[in-house]
Structures are given as structure tokens and as C-alpha cells.
Image: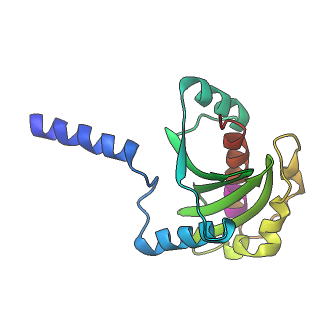
Amino acid sequence: MRPLIIFIILSSYLLVVSPVSNAYSADEKNKIQLFLNQVFDDEVPPAKRLWLTAELKSSLSQLLNQSPTKLSYRYWQADDTVVWVLDEIGKERDITTGIVVKNNQVYDVAVIIYRESKGGEVQIPWFTAQFRQATTQHNWQKDIDGISGATLSVNALKKQVTTALALNSLIP
């Protein structure tokens, strides 16, 4: 019984301190790295983590109207550019999206890894361009055109952008 308890504690610790928030495959890690290279012109800054203290968790809960499920969020920052790589479930599987925030407004959104079988239109640039210039100060969500048959994927991207803007406002 004791070895099982030690195993569970060690496994939990590794999940919390692991530099990768999800178990990405090598190919998925490469796609994320390519996205970061494009954003930062091949000079990707080291990843940082925003750890959710009780105070930050409370603030984030108010901004998102729900309690966050993660202990920390990974981001990359150089000058006024911050990149958040977030995962959100569409209908059944995660959608990995990169959200670039400059001067507290969305500069770009790119679906890095789309794992769903339907609703892939959310990856098309005309769709992701709708999120540009979104801020926490403006009710931008009503301006996003939906995609017939991809409602859950559209909602996932809206949630990711909302989360990125909320997290960005909490960076010390």
C-alpha cells in the first residue's frame, strides 16, 4: 500500500511541475514550436508560468464566470507581445490554439492543432481574424460569426480567447 501512495504523490507532483501542460506528441510539440517561431521571428523567449494563487484564481473566476481547472498557465512574453497556447474541448477532443496578445488586445489567433472530425472551418484565417482587436473592455463575442455545424468548436475558440485576455490582465 505504501509504494502505491508514494507513486500517486510523485505522479501528482510531476503533473504539476511538468513544463508541458498536456501530453503533446512530438509532432504536436513541433507545431507549437513552429507557431512560436513565426510569432517571435525565431527568437522565442523562454516560457513563463502564471501560477494561480488563491487571489489570482478568484480574479480569473470573476473574469471567466467560472472557476479555472488548472493550477498554472504557460505563456511566452517579449516586450508587449504575449502568447498563450491553450487547449479547450470542442465537441469531444482538445483544440490547441495560439492567442497572441499585444498591448492587452488580441493581435492574432491561430488554431495550431485541431483534433475534431468536424468543425475544422474554425482554422480558416477569415474566421480567426474576427478575434483580432478583442479586449476585456469590449463585448466582442457578439461580433463573432458562427459556423453552421461547428458551434462547439466556435464556442471553444471564444472561450480560449476570453481566457487568454483574462490571464493576460493578471500577469504581474
Q: Nearer the viewer, residue 10 or 88?
A: 10
- Apparent side of residue 130 relative to residue 7 in the rendered image (left or right): right
**Residue 88 placement (x, y as % from top left):** 59, 55
Main SS class of the magenta portion in the image = helix
Residue 87 on image: x %, y %: 57, 56
Query: Does 28 sit left or right of 150 as displayed?
Result: left
Please identify the quarter of the rendering in which residue 66 is found: top right
The location of residue 158, given as percent across then percent down, is 73, 54
Q: Quadrant of residue 166?
A: top right
Whether 101 is drawn above or below 98: the answer is above
Going 53% across and 54% down the picture, which residue do you hit?
46
Instruction: Check residue 156 for magenta coloring.
Output: yes
Nearer-the-camera pick, 99 or 80: 80
- Quarter placement of the N terminus: top left
Q: Residue 71 at x, y = what percent?
A: 49, 38
Looking at the rendering, the stretch of residues picked out in magenta corresponds to 153-157
The extreme top residue here reads: 55
